[in-house]
């Protein structure tokens, strides 16, 4: 009996090895696979790291300076020192409005002719006009302008001695992302995207290809077991996913100087767990569609796009309608996103790590079991 | 109990239903099927398209489950123990799933590993399979870069890496040229005699079924008849005759006339310059109104029995609408016209590979012109150049009086092209497809409506208008493809392997329409792997390795192959003789390294 079992085990290993060898050969010979598995992650890293940024830089500000007093000049000088803004000073409100109308500036700061006089009276009113087409950008610009004005005001008071007033000043600091640099949270998010891309999209595609080309029909009528076919798909694409992860980590450290506050080994383990989840989704999609075109569409729509939009990568999940929140929380990517951001920027915070890993592990087991159940050696 | 006492396959009352995707109605693919397959012999399943051959093989392979009945394979209940059966059999699906990125050797290795073939056995087995399939020189070539025939042979080799207890073959020779087909059969037959291999094979070639010990005729999911080829043929005993066509006329005209005479004739085909036909039981040959001296009785073959069985069942008559078409003066009279296709020293190179080498021929108006040759002979390349889809590397080609170098677009407007693969929109209906392609050819308004009505009638497509093209049965799809190709009333119709995989019944209907088209003055250029179909052609060329080996009427070509009054050849024998002779001559003049 044990002899028979040992024989079965040997056959299993031999078949699995043969299938994995085949899978690696195909992977390396088909350029489209390599393009999706390696080329696309590199492109994404470069786009997200260099090309894309949610920071507002070079905001163009027109200053309508109708007052020629030293106080007014001092205020404007404070704005011109900022690295985030480029200011254009014009002499009249009409000229500044023209710049706004022509969209040559993003905001207009109006210092009226009686600015100095009112400032002396303690009522230094200025007007800030913003382009409303891009509220996020406008809000950032408002922040910059207000900050610069407040700083100028502070300096003036310091010079005059604290007697002039006892204004309460909030001193802000951005925790976990000290520079408020968006690459700091884009790059960790990229890990989620790339692992979803390789695990779900690429795997669904190559498995659906086997259904479509009829290679499975020939393969099925051999001693091969369905579980072996699935396992042989998981191993190589797991490896490709790890290559993607490695590239992201290297890029994060070497190119973008993103700190990794948490434990690297926890990050690696969590990523492997998510890779299995992602592969499970890919195998499930291909088992249902059995068609490359459909599989790629479903993989993009059901996995890649939601990971991008609904996992909290770009939009904060707490600010979306409850229905969307529910969808977001059904996605395994949401938990992995939280986990990766925590590990990168905050550190190994065990309550979050354990909770998210447990949820991902449940997904992994459920998805693989489901994929195994629906992949049968049957054509009807 | 020894293996010989158990049948390899024992199906009793097997039924299988599928849901029709369009109507959601349940359709019976198999109904109450009894089939027994003995050990150590060849058993064939024959039948028209959609008869249920593939479904039956998939049931036997454990890839589908029967709805009713009992099916035991190698003594095991395949429904309960599919894996146990799959461990012991080999199955070659219609489209064998080779891994195209892997080399020939890697494909073989994969299957050997999956079957846990020990290394010493493997070495000996590979050597033998590669020698049999003649693939030794190509072991490092990716499977995707092999010709169609070589792919089939590799597929067979992969299924035979170890000797299975039962081999299932689903139409293994569709789209394979006669030479490769013969080689495939030699391999199978050697294994049957040497290793007592049990084989169950589905085929639409009657000559292949004739080599089997047992034949089961399937029709619409039911077994019409079972027995040895001789027993099946006996259904046509005493009914087979052949007739000589009037001098100067191609045999297809007489064949069409006989085929149209439903009351008296079951079937008629041109054969060896004469017309072979089967009478209905009640009719005597004298009642046909043919000169008695041109008639003679002949021995019945499996195909005759098959046709008798099938025509008794299906009320469908081949190409009914084609009969109503105007019969023109025919090719004989049209032959005096200037040629509509003129090809001189045509060359096509891909890199340093010469696909077509200095080929010259001409085709007259209203002619049916056949291009024959093994896989990779240059037929498809020649075809594509004539259709203006591929520019020639050298030489001249004039089509419908237009030079293909300078007026490719105009020339294309004068031709219709039906490709080998189904190239219509599967999710558009028949009518939408016709309207779209009509528009693409520049037809609109009343002219388009009138042409659509005409082709719908001509190709018996009425009643199918609202069906999505992808869901039509194979034969109807093919008629739709031809209808689309003829919408703009082209002078020339190009057909690339139109009958590949079609059953004899569908092929009769197809050729009846071609005969009618040619009589109405349309020139038809056609490629085929069924050599007997060359008999419908006025003239044929045989190509191999890019070179033209023979050009002439079927009779001239047979004579070139060495036919004499004593030694009659059929087209397939003639074809093989000509190609082999040319290959032998080439090998002696330019020895391969």
Image (cartoon, coloured by chain):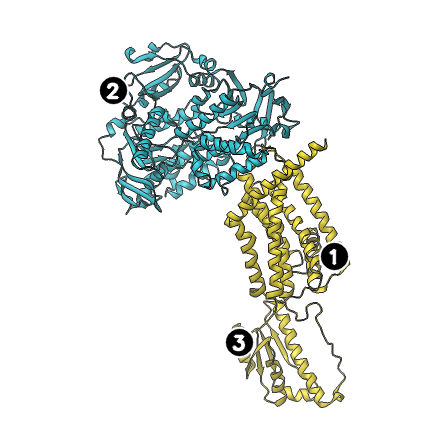
Chain colours: A yellow, B cyan
Do the residues bearing badges 1 and 3 touch, measured as CB atoms within 8 Å? no
Give the CA distance from mark 1 to mark 3: 51 Å
Q: Which mark is residue A99?
A: 3
* Residue A336 falls left or right of residue B103: right
Which label is found at residue B247?
A: 2
Do the residues bearing badges 1 and 2 touch, measured as CB atoms within 8 Å?
no
Please, what secondary structure does the residue beneath circle 2 have?
A: loop
Asked whether B249 or A126 is in front, the reply is B249
Q: How many labels does the image show?
A: 3
Quadrant in which the C terminus of chain B is drawn: top left
**A36 lies above or below B453:** below
Q: Is residue B130 left or right of residue B538?
A: right
Relative image position of residue A252 (x, y in whole percent): 62, 63
Q: Mark 2 lies on which chain?
A: B
Closer to the N terminus: mark 1 or mark 3? 3
Q: Where is residue B572 in the image (x, y as percent from the top left)?
A: 36, 25
Residue B334: quarter of image:
top left
Circle 1: element type? helix
Circle 1 residues within 10 Å: few <14, some 14–19, many ≥20 = many
Can you tell which of label 2 and label 3 is closer to the viewer?
2
Quadrant of residue B268 within the rendered picture: top left
Q: Nearer the viewer, mark 1 or mark 3?
A: 1
**Disc number placed over residue B146 in the picture, else none:** none
Q: Using a 10 Å C-alpha cutoff, classify the residue at mark 2 as few (fewer than 14 neighbours), some (14 to 19) or many (20 or more).
A: few
Find residue A353 and name its label. 1
Residue contact at pointers 2 and 3, CB within 8 angstroms: no
User: For the residues tagged 1 and 2, is the chain the same?
Assistant: no
Given the image, what chain letter belongs to the residue carrying mark 1? Answer: A
Q: In which quarter of the image is the N terminus of chain B?
A: top right
Same chain letter for marks 2 and 3: no
């Amino acid at each position: 009996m044990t002899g028979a079992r040992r024989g079965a085990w040997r056959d299993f290993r031999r078949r699995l090895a043969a299938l994995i060898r085949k899978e690696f050969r195909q992977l390396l010979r088909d350029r489209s696979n390599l393009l999706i598995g390696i080329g696309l992650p590199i492109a994404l890293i470069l786009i997200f790291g260099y090309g894309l940024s949610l920071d507002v830089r070079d905001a163009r500000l027109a200053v309508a300076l109708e007052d020629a007093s030293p106080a007014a000049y001092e205020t404007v000088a404070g704005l011109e020192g900022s690295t985030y803004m480029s200011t254009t000073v014009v002499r009249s409100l009409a000229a500044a409005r023209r710049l706004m109308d022509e969209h040559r500036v993003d905001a207009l700061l109006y210092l009226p002719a009686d600015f100095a006089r009112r400032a002396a009276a303690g009522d230094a009113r200025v007007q800030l006009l913003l382009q409303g087409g891009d509220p996020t950008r406008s809000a950032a610009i408002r922040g910059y302008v207000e900050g610069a004005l407040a700083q100028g005001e502070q300096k003036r008071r310091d010079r005059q001695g604290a007697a002039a007033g006892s204004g309460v000043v909030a001193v802000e600091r951005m925790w976990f992302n000290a520079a408020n640099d968006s690459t700091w949270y884009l790059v960790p998010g990229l890990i989620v995207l790339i692992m979803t891309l390789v695990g779900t999209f690429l795997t669904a595609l190559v498995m659906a290809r086997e259904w479509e080309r009829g290679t499975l029909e020939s393969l099925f009528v051999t001693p091969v077991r369905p579980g072996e076919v699935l396992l042989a798909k998981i191993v190589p694409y797991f490896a490709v996913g790890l290559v993607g992860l490695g590239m992201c980590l290297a890029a994060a450290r070497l190119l973008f100087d993103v700190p990794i506050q948490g434990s690297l080994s926890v990050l690696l383990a969590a990523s492997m767990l998510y890779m299995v989840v992602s592969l499970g989704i890919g195998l499930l999609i291909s088992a249902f569609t059995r068609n490359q075109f459909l599989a790629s569409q479903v993989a993009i729509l059901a996995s890649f796009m939601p990971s991008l939009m609904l996992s909290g990568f770009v939009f904060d999940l707490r600010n979306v309608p409850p229905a969307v929140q529910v969808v977001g929380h059904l996605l395994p990517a949401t938990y992995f996103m939280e986990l990766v951001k925590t590990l990168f920027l905050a550190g190994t915070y065990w309550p979050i790590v354990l909770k998210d890993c447990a949820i991902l592990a449940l997904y992994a087991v459920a998805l693989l079991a489901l994929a195994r159940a629906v992949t049968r050696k049957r054509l009807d | 109990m020894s293996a010989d006492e158990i049948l390899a396959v024992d199906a009793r009352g097997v039924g299988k239903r599928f849901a029709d995707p369009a109507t959601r109605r349940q359709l019976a693919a198999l109904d109450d099927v009894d089939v027994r397959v003995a050990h150590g012999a060849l058993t064939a399943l024959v039948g028209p398209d959609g008869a249920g051959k593939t479904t039956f093989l998939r049931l036997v392979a454990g890839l589908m489950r029967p709805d009713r009945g009992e099916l035991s394979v190698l003594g095991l209940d395949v429904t309960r123990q599919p894996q146990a059966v799959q461990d012991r059999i080999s199955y070659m699906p219609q489209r064998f799933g080779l891994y195209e990125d892997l080399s020939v050797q890697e494909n073989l290795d994969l299957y050997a590993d999956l079957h846990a073939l020990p290394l010493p056995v493997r070495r000996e087995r590979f050597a033998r399979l590669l020698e049999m399939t003649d693939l030794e020189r190509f072991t490092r070539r990716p499977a995707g870069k092999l010709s169609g025939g070589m792919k089939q042979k590799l597929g067979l080799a992969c299924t035979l890496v170890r000797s299975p207890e039962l081999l299932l073959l689903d139409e293994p020779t569709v789209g394979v040229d006669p030479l490769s087909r013969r080689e495939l059969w030699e391999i199978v037959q050697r294994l049957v005699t040497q290793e007592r291999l049990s084989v169950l094979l589905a085929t639409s070639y009657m000559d292949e079924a004739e080599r089997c010990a047992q034949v089961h005729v399937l029709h619409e999911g039911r077994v019409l008849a079972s027995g040895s080829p001789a027993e099946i043929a006996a259904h046509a005993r005493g009914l087979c005759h052949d007739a000589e066509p009037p001098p100067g006329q191609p045999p297809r005209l007489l064949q069409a006339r006989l085929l149209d005479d439903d009351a008296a004739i079951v079937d008629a085909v041109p054969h060896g310059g004469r017309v072979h036909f089967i009478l209905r039981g009640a009719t005597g040959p004298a009642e046909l109104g043919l000169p008695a001296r041109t008639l003679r009785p002949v021995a019945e073959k499996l195909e005759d029995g098959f046709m008798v069985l099938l025509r008794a069942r299906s009320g469908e008559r081949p190409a009914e609408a084609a009969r109503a078409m105007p019969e023109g003066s025919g090719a004989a009279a049209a032959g005096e016209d200037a040629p509509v296709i003129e090809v001189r020293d045509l060359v096509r190179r891909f890199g340093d590979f010469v696909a077509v080498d200095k080929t010259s021929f001409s085709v007259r108006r209203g002619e049916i012109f056949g291009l024959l040759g093994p896989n990779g002979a240059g037929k498809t390349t020649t075809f594509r150049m004539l259709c203006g889809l591929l520019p020639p590397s050298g030489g001249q080609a004039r089509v419908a009086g237009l030079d293909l170098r300078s007026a490719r677009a105009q020339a294309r407007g004068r031709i219709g092209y039906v490709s080998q693969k189904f190239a219509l929109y599967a999710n558009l209906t028949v009518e939408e497809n016709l309207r779209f392609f009509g528009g693409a050819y520049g037809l609109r308004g009343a002219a388009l409506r009138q042409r659509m009505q005409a082709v719908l009638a001509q190709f018996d497509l009425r009643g199918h208008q609202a069906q999505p093209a992808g869901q039509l049965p194979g034969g109807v799809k093919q008629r739709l493809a031809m209808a689309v190709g003829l919408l703009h009333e082209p002078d020339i119709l190009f057909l690339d392997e139109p009958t590949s995989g079609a059953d004899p019944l569908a092929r009769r209907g197809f050729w009846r329409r071609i005969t009618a088209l040619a009589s109405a003055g349309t020139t038809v250029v056609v490629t085929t792997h069924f050599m007997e179909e060359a008999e419908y052609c006025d003239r044929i060329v045989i190509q191999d390795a890019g070179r033209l080996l023979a050009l002439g009427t079927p009779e001239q070509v047979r004579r070139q192959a060495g036919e004499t009054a004593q030694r009659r050849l059929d087209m397939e024998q003639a074809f093989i003789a000509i190609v082999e002779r040319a290959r032998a001559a080439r090998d002696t003049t330019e020895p391969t390294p």
